[in-house]
C-alpha cells in the first residue's frame, strides 16, 4: 500500500476531507433493490440499483484523502479499535484504487459479474470465454455506450485492473524474495537489524493473532477478554483454536530423529564448499527450533506436574545441560524423572547435534580475520548461526520467565556466544604471535653473524607495525560483520596491545629498559614512532583510556581475562579498559626511555659533528662579486639537513620526540656558535669571510625550518615552539655576522696604533705637525681599508663597519690622551708646553676626522647620527681642557655633567677621567676638581644614575671590544699605577667598584653559558 499510495495522483487543490467509496454494503446482497424518492434508478446487469441523485453527486468522483502512516493511525489504540481502524483503512485503500484506476464509472454503468461469474470464468480452460462474442477481428460496427458515456465491451476494465494488481503484487513479492535471498551480502549491521526486526515482528504478530481470537465488540470494557470469567469455556476455545498447532508440534516431535539425521547430513555435506557457512546457518536455524520445542516441552510438562506449588530444582538426566538439585519430594522427583526419561533420547540426539554445530562454528571463528576479509557474507552467516541460539534463549526468558516452571526446567539452549568470543580471542592472540614468529624467523635467516640482535629488534618492530596497522581492517572490514555487543574491536585491541607490549619489553630488557642503550639511533627512532602510532590508535578508538594513567593489574605473565563470570556471556569492559590502560601506559614508559636515550645520542652526535665542522681548516674563497666566504655554511647545514631528514622520515609530525630533537639541534647550533665564533676572527680577511658565512648560515637555517614546517604540517603550538627555538639561533647568527664585520676595526687600527699612537699628543704633534699630519695618516689608513671592505662585505655589513670605525676613532683618540695623562709625572706643570696650541691641534684633528666620515654619509645616510653621537665627547673634552688651563670662563660643573651622562652615569669613571684631564693640564688643581666632583655626586646620580643594563651591554658577547669609552676607561684605570689625590680607603673602594662592575659581569656571563649548556 505504501508503494501504491506513493504512486497515486494527488490533487493539492482539494483541502477538505473526502468520503471513502463504501458503496458495497456488506450487510446487503448485491441484487437488493432500494426505494428512492426522486427519479428512477439505473439497473446494472447484476441488479444493483443506485439513485439518480447519488449518481449525479460529484462527491462520488472525488479521490479519498491520503491516509496517515500505520504508526500514526495505530498509535495508542486498543485491540478492538485497531480492528475497526484496520477495516476502515482497507475500505479506503480499495476506494482509492478504484478512483485512481478509473473503475468507478465502469461499476456504475456496467456493474460487476459477481463472484460466481468470476469463479466460473476462472475455472474455464485457457483460451475460452463463456460470454465471448464471435467477432475476433475489428469491424466498423458501433459500440454500445453506457449511461455515463463509456463504451461497454466484453472485457471489463475491472478485470484488467485486478489482473494488473495481481501481477504487480507478484512482482513485488518476487523482488522482496530476491532481496531476502541476497541479504547475506549486506553488511553485518544491516543484517543484524533486519533479523532483529523480523524476530520482533514475528513475536508481535503471534501474540496479536492469539489475543485477537478472544476479542469481540460485545465486551463492555474493550481492553478485557470476553472469556475472562469463563475459564472452562476458555480452555475449550483454546483447545479448539490451537488443535492444528498441537498436531503439527506432535508431528514435528515425532520426526525429530529424522530431522536430526537430515541436519547432520546437510552439515557435513556442506563442509569444504563455497556454501559451507551458509549451510551452517541454515542448519543452526532449524536446530534451534528443535531445542526450543524440547525446552518448552520439558518446562511445560514439569509445570503441569508442579501445578500451582513451586518446586525446587533437581538433577535429572546425565547430560551436561542439566544442573543438579535433589530437594524435591519423592513423588515429584519420580514424576520429573519420568519426564526426563521420556525426553532423554531426543535431548541427547539434539544436543549432540548442537555440539557438532558448535564445533564447526568454532572452527570457522578460528579463522574469522581472514574469513571477514575474503568473504564478509560468510562471516555474517557464521555470526547469525551463533546469534540464533542467543536470541532464542533471550526471547524464551523474556516470554516465559518463571510462568512455565523454568525453575524446574533443566534444559538450556546451546551456549554459543560465550564460546565464540573466547574462540575469537584465542584466534586474535594466536594470529598476533604467529605474525611475530614468522617475521622473526624470516629475519633470522638473512641476518649476518654479528648483526643478529639488531635484525631481530627491527623484525619485532616490523611485526608490531603490521599488527597495529590492521586496525583499519578491523574497523572497516571485520567490525561491520559482528553485532555491536560482541565488541570485536575491544578483543582485537586487547590482544594486539598485550602481544606487542610483551614482545617489545623482551627486546629492551623489561619495563626498566636496561637494553635501550644497546639500540642504534635508527632503532630508537623507530621505537619512539611505533609507540606514538600505537598510542594514537588506542586513544582514538577508546578515548577514555587516554585519561587512565594507572591500571589495577599488570599483565606481564598471561593474557588478560576479558570475559564476565556471570550469565551475561559478554566482555567485561572494565577489565578490557584496564588491560588497554596498562599496555598504553607501559609502552609510554618505554617511549620515554627511548626518547631520552635518542635525544642524548643526538646531542652527542651533533656535538661531534659541530666540533669537526668548526675545527676544520678552511681557505677563503671569493664569489663572483668579490665577497669572501668559506665552506663553513655548506659543511654545517649539509649535516643538519641529514639529521633533520632522518628524524622527519622516522617520526610523525605530532611526535614529541621530533619537536624535541629539532629544538635540540637548534640549541646545539646556537651553543656551538656562541663558543666557536671568535675562532674565525683571526685577521681582516677571515673576519670578513666569517661575517658573510654567518649571514648565509642565518638564511639556510631559516630555509631549513620553513622546509620542515611545509612538509610536516605542524599544529600551531608546535610551530610556535619551533619558531621560538629557531629564532634564538637566527638571532645569534645575525648578531655574530655584525660582530665579525665590526671586529675588523681592530685589524684596521692595528697599523694606526703602531704608526701614530706614541706621537699623538707629544711635543712633535704640538709644535711641528701644524697640518694635522697624524690625523691625516689615520683617515688615509681607514680609507685604504674601506676600499677592501667594500669588496669583501655586502652593503649592510659595510655600514655596520663604518659605524664601528667612527666609535673606534673616538676611543683611540681619547685613550691616547689618557695614556699621556697616566704617564705624566709632577704636580707643578702640565704636559703641554702651550695648551692653546695643543687645543688648536685637537681642533684640527677633530675637523679632519669629521670631514672624512661626513664624506661617507652620502653612501651611508645612517652614519650621520653616529658621528653626531660619538663626536659629542670631543666637545666636552675640549671644553674641560680649556677650563683646566684657564682659557675658558665656563663652569666646569656643566661639562662634568655632560661627561657623566656620556659615561652612562658611572661616577667613578667620571671622577677618574676629569681628574686625569686636570692632572694632564693643571696638576696643581687636581685635588680641587676631585673635591668638586665629590660635592656634585648626589646631583650627578640624580641626573644620570649608574646603569647596570649599560654595563651588562658593554660586557655582552655581542659588544665588540674597543668601541665603548666606558669600557676602555675601566680597563685602563684598573691597570693604572698613578697615585690619585684621594684617601687610600676611597681609592680602594673605587677599585673594588670598578672590578665588580667591569669584571664580575664577564664571569657571570661565562657562568650563564655553562649553566645553559647543563640545562640543554
Image: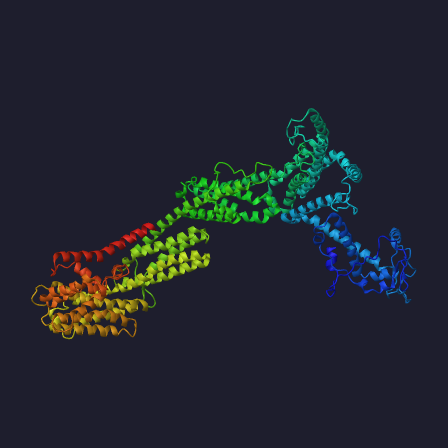
Could you say where residue 738 lies in the image, as x and y percent from the top left? 30, 64
The quadrant in which the N terminus is found is bottom right
- What is the x, y in percent for residue 35? 90, 59
Farthest-out residue, front? 220
User: Is 727 or 100 nearer to us in this picture?
Assistant: 100
Instruction: Compare residues 533 and 148 and report the one nearer the observer.
Output: 148
Is any atom of residue 522 visible in this view? yes
Q: State the count of labels.
A: 0
Where does the image place residue 1001, in percent across and percent down from the top left? 25, 56
Evaluate whether residue 443 shows in this view. Answer: no
Q: In this view, does 235 lie to the left or right of 481?
A: right
Q: In this view, does 761 lie to the left or right of 379?
A: left
Farthest residue to the right: give it: 134
The image quadrant that residue 516 belongs to is top left
Give x and y (percent) for residue 883.
14, 71
Report whether 127 appears left or right of 452.
right
Residue 638 to residue 263: above or below: below
Left or right of 1003, for residue 725 = right
**Residue 436 vertical placement versus 973 (above, below):** above
Q: Is residue 170 above or below residue 767?
A: above
Q: Which colour scheme is used?
A: rainbow
| Farthest left residue in view | 828
Q: In which quarter of the image is residue 890?
A: bottom left
Of residues 893 and 503, the one drawn nearer to the viewer in this rendering: 893
Amino acid at each position: 500500500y505504501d508503494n501504491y499510495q506513493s504512486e497515486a495522483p494527488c490533487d493539492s487543490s482539494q483541502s477538505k476531507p473526502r468520503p471513502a467509496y463504501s458503496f458495497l454494503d456488506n450487510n446487503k446482497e448485491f441484487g437488493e433493490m432500494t426505494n428512492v424518492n426522486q427519479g428512477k434508478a439505473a439497473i446494472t446487469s447484476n441488479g444493483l440499483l443506485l439513485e439518480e441523485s447519488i449518481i449525479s453527486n460529484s462527491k462520488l468522483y472525488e479521490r479519498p484523502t491520503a491516509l496517515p502512516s500505520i504508526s500514526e493511525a495505530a498509535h495508542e489504540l486498543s485491540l478492538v479499535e485497531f480492528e475497526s481502524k484496520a477495516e476502515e483503512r482497507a475500505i479506503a485503500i480499495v476506494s482509492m484504487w478504484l478512483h485512481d484506476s478509473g473503475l468507478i464509472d465502469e461499476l456504475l454503468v456496467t456493474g460487476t459479474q459477481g463472484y460466481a461469474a468470476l469463479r466460473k470464468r476462472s475455472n474455464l480452460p485457457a483460451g475460452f470465454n463463456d460470454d465471448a462474442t464471435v467477432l475476433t477481428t475489428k469491424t466498423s460496427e458501433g459500440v454500445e455506450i453506457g449511461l455515463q458515456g463509456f463504451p461497454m465491451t466484453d472485457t471489463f476494465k475491472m478485470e484488467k485492473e485486478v489482473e494488473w494488481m495481481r501481477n504487480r503484487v507478484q512482482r513485488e513479492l518476487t523482488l522482496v524474495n530476491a532481496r531476502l535471498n541476497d541479504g547475506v551480502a549486506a553488511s553485518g549491521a544491516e543484517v543484524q537489524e533486519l533479523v532483529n526486526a523480523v524476530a520482533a515482528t514475528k513475536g508481535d504478530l503471534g501474540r496479536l493473532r492469539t489475543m485477537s481470537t478472544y476479542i469481540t465488540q460485545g465486551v463492555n470494557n474493550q481492553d478485557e477478554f470476553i472469556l475472562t470469567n469463563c475459564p472452562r469455556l476458555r480452555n475449550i476455545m483454546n483447545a479448539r483454536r490451537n488443535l492444528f498447532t498441537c498436531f503439527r508440534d506432535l508431528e514435528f516431535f515425532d520426526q525429530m530423529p529424522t530431522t536430526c539425521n537430515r541436519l547432520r547430513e546437510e552439515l557435513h555435506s556442506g563442509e569444504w564448499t563455497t556454501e559451507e557457512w551458509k549451510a551452517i546457518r541454515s542448519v543452526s536455524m532449524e536446530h534451534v527450533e528443535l531445542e526450543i520445542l524440547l525446552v518448552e516441552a520439558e518446562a511445560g510438562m514439569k509445570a503441569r506436574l508442579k501445578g500451582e506449588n513451586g518446586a525446587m530444582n533437581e538433577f535429572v538426566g546425565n547430560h551436561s545441560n542439566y544442573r543438579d538439585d535433589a530437594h524435591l519430594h519423592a513423588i515429584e522427583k519420580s514424576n520429573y524423572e519420568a519426564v526426563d526419561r521420556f525426553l532423554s533420547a531426543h535431548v541427547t540426539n539434539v544436543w549432540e547435534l548442537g555440539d557438532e554445530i558448535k564445533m564447526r562454528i568454532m572452527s570457522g571463528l578460528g579463522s574469522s580475520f581472514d574469513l571477514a576479509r575474503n568473504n564478509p557474507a560468510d562471516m555474517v552467516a557464521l555470526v547469525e548461526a551463533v546469534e540464533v541460539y542467543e536470541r532464542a534463549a533471550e526471547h524464551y526468558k523474556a516470554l516465559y520467565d518463571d510462568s512455565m516452571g523454568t525453575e524446574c526446567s533443566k534444559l538450556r539452549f546451546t551456549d554459543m556466544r560465550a564460546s565464540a568470543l573466547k574462540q575469537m580471542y584465542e584466534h586474535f592472540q594466536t594470529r598476533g604471535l604467529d605474525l611475530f614468529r614468522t617475521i622473526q624467523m624470516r629475519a633470522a635467516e638473512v641476518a649476518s653473524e654479528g648483526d643478529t640482535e639488531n635484525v631481530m629488534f627491527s623484525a619485532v618492530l616490523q611485526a608490531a607495525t603490521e599488527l597495529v596497522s590492521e586496525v583499519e581492517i578491523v574497523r572497516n572490514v571485520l567490525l561491520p560483520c559482528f553485532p555491536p555487543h560482541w565488541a570485536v574491536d575491544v578483543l582485537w585491541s586487547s590482544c594486539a596491545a598485550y602481544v606487542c607490549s610483551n614482545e617489545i619489553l623482551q627486546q629492551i630488557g623489561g619495563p626498566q629498559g636496561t637494553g635501550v642503550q644497546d639500540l642504534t639511533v635508527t632503532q630508537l627512532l623507530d621505537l619512539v614512532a611505533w609507540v606514538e602510532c600505537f598510542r594514537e590508535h588506542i586513544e582514538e578508538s577508546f578515548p577514555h583510556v587516554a585519561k587512565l594513567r594507572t591500571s589495577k593489574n599488570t599483565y606481564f605473565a598471561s593474557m588478560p581475562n576479558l570475559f564476565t563470570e556471570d550469565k551475561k556471556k559478554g566482555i567485561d569492559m572494565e577489565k578490557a579498559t584496564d588491560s588497554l590502560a596498562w599496555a598504553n601506559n607501559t609502552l609510554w614508559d618505554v617511549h620515554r626511555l627511548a626518547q631520552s636515550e635518542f635525544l642524548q645520542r643526538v646531542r652527542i652526535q651533533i656535538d661531534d659533528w659541530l666540533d669537526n665542522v668548526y675545527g676544520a681548516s678552511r681557505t677563503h674563497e671569493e664569489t663572483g662579486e668579490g665577497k669572501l666566504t668559506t665552506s663553513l655554511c655548506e659543511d654545517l647545514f649539509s649535516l643538519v639537513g641529514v639529521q633533520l631528514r632522518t628524524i622527519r622520515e622516522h617520526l610523525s609530525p605530532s611526535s614529541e620526540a621530533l619537536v624535541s630533537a629539532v629544538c635540540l639541534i637548534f640549541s646545539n647550533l646556537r651553543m656551538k656558535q656562541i663558543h666557536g665564533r671568535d675562532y674565525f676572527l683571526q685577521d681582516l680577511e677571515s673576519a670578513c669571510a666569517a661575517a658573510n658565512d654567518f649571514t648565509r648560515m642565518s638564511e639556510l637555517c631559516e630555509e631549513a625550518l620553513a622546509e620542515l614546517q611545509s612538509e610536516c604540517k605542524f599544529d600551531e603550538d608546535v610551530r610556535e615552539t619551533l619558531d621560538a627555538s629557531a629564532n634564538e639561533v637566527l638571532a645569534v647568527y645575525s648578531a655574530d655576522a655584525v660582530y665579525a664585520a665590526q671586529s675588523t676595526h681592530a685589524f684596521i687600527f692595528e697599523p694606526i696604533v703602531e704608526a701614530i699612537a706614541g706621537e699623538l699628543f707629544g711635543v712633535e704633534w704640538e709644535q711641528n705637525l701644524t697640518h694635522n699630519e697624524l690625523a691625516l695618516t689615520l683617515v688615509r689608513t681607514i680609507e685604504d681599508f674601506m676600499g677592501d671592505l667594500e669588496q669583501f662585505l655586502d652593503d649592510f655589513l659595510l655600514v655596520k663597519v663604518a659605524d664601528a670605525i667612527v666609535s673606534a676613532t673616538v676611543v683611540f683618540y681619547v685613550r691616547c690622551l689618557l695614556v699621556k695623562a697616566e704617564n705624566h709625572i709632577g704636580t707643578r706643570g702640565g704636559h703641554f708646553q702651550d695648551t692653546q696650541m695643543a687645543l688648536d691641534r685637537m681642533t684640527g684633528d677633530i675637523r679632519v676626522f669629521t670631514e672624512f666620515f661626513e664624506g661617507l654619509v652620502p653612501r651611508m645616510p645612517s652614519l650621520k647620527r653616529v658621528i653626531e653621537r660619538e663626536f659629542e665627547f670631543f666637545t666636552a673634552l675640549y671644553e674641560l681642557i680649556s677650563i683646566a688651563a684657564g682659557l675658558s670662563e665656563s663652569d666646569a660643573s656643566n661639562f662634568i655633567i655632560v661627561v657623566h651622562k656620556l659615561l652612562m652615569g658611572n661616577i667613578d669613571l667620571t671622577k677618574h677621567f676629569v681628574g686625569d684631564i686636570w692632572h694632564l693640564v693643571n696638576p696643581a688643581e687636581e685635588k680641587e676638581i676631585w673635591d668638586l666632583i665629590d660635592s656634585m655626586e648626589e646631583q650627578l646620580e640624580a641626573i644620570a644614575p649608574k646603569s647596570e643594563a649599560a654595563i651588562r651591554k658593554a660586557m655582552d658577547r655581542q659588544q665588540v671590544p674597543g668601541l665603548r669609552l666606558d669600557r676602555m676607561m675601566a680597563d685602563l684605570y684598573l691597570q693604572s699605577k698613578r697615585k690619585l689625590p684621594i684617601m687610600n680607603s676611597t681609592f680602594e673602594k673605587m677599585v673594588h667598584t670598578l672590578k665588580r662592575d667591569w669584571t664580575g659581569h664577564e664571569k657571570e656571563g661565562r657562568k650563564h653559558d655553562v649553566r645553559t649548556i647543563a640545562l640543554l
